[in-house]
Amino acid sequence: MPKDGSVIGVMSSVELQLPPQIGSWDRGDARAARRAIRSGAYAGYTAGIAGGYVQANVCILPRAYAEVFLLYCQRNPKPCPLLARSDPGDARLPALAEDLDIRTDIARYHVFRDGELVQELSDISSIWSDDLITFALGCSFSFEEALQQAGLRLRFLERGNVAGVYVTDIATVPAGPFQGPLVVTMRAFKPADAIRAVQVTSRFPNVHGAPVHIGNPGQIGVDLSKRYHNVGDSEVADDELPVFWACGLTPQLAVKNARPPLCITHAPSYMLITDVRNAALAVL
């Protein structure tokens, strides 16, 4: 993928997962991962990259929309757990990493104009301005590490995939023009493991916390065959239950309704890798 701010696709490529381009860099090191993304050496999903480090959802908005979006996050802490917020025009997020540059350190960005997805970029330097404010929100990739440490198998990771993403019929609490349905991720577990998954993820409220639903997907308006932008794995074995967690893609649907003149987000599962340790977010 080019790192010069050029357009790499519009709606037709949203569902495409680009193959990783892996060079001689340490996949377990957060700073090395950011540098690889910045240089174009890596352009794939970030699940499984820089294990042990927090990955974040990103929403970048003009200053005029920032305060009401902050209120939306505060009213919907499950899908929108705020980790950091930048100063206007500042591409840094020093609370998350000293060398981080939000303009270059995500492999794939989505650009919305008046609520519509119009571009995918690998570098947003060309559209950056002093009016923009970055919000970094917690991501379920962090609690997936804790699930694995607890002995819970995540088969989709073994296949190089991510958890399935779905739009529910559950409404979020609106704030000004920001409103929309809750987006969730799904992981399948046997019943006993599902109980353990609830216990484990409850310790991580800053990365979505405990599930919002277990069992029948139809009760929250979900059809497992219809994933959001075809992202992730939908497999549920006969002896398993689908377990649903709030997802940091929820704000993207709220942005579509708010229709700001510009909004920049990460593409689904192309996250911002930070230097914060997942363990630092656990609540004892």
Image (tube, rainbow, N blue to C red):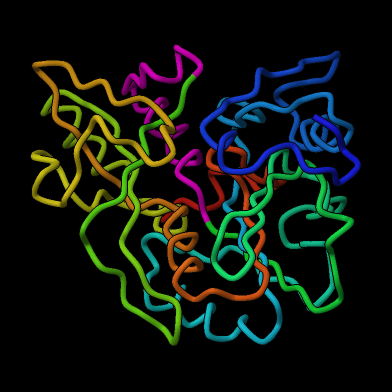
Left or right: 115 in relation to 62: left
Seen in the picture, residue 223 relative to 261 is either above or below; the reply is above
Q: Is residue 139 magenta?
A: yes
Whole-percent x, y for residue 161 in the image = 47, 21
| Quadrant in the rendering for residue 189 | top left
Whole-percent x, y for residue 187 in the image = 29, 31
The quarter of the rendered structure image containing the C terminus is: bottom left
How many discs appear? 0
Left or right: 66 in relation to 211: right
Whole-percent x, y for residue 233 in the image = 36, 25
Report the magenta residues as a range: 138-160
Q: Nearer the viewer, residue 60 or 26?
A: 60
| Quadrant in the rendering for residue 121 | top right
Q: Is residue 30 magenta?
A: no
Q: Nearer the viewer, residue 205 or 104?
A: 104
Q: Which residue is at a point 74% across and 71% down the rendered structure image?
A: 86
Seen in the picture, residue 37 relative to 274 is either above or below; the reply is above
Seen in the picture, residue 211 relative to 25 is either above or below; the reply is below
Whole-percent x, y for residue 151 in the image = 33, 21
Seen in the picture, residue 103 relative to 262 is either above or below; the reply is above
Q: Which residue is at a point 71% across and 83% down the rendered structure image?
A: 63
Q: Which residue is at a point 54% across and 67% down the rendered structure image?
A: 115
Q: Nearer the viewer, residue 73 or 167?
A: 167
Q: Which residue is at a point 26% across and 36% down the rendered structure image?
A: 197
| Quadrant in the rendering for residue 128 | bottom right
Q: Nearer the viewer, residue 195 or 86?
A: 86
The quarter of the rendered structure image containing the N terminus is: top right
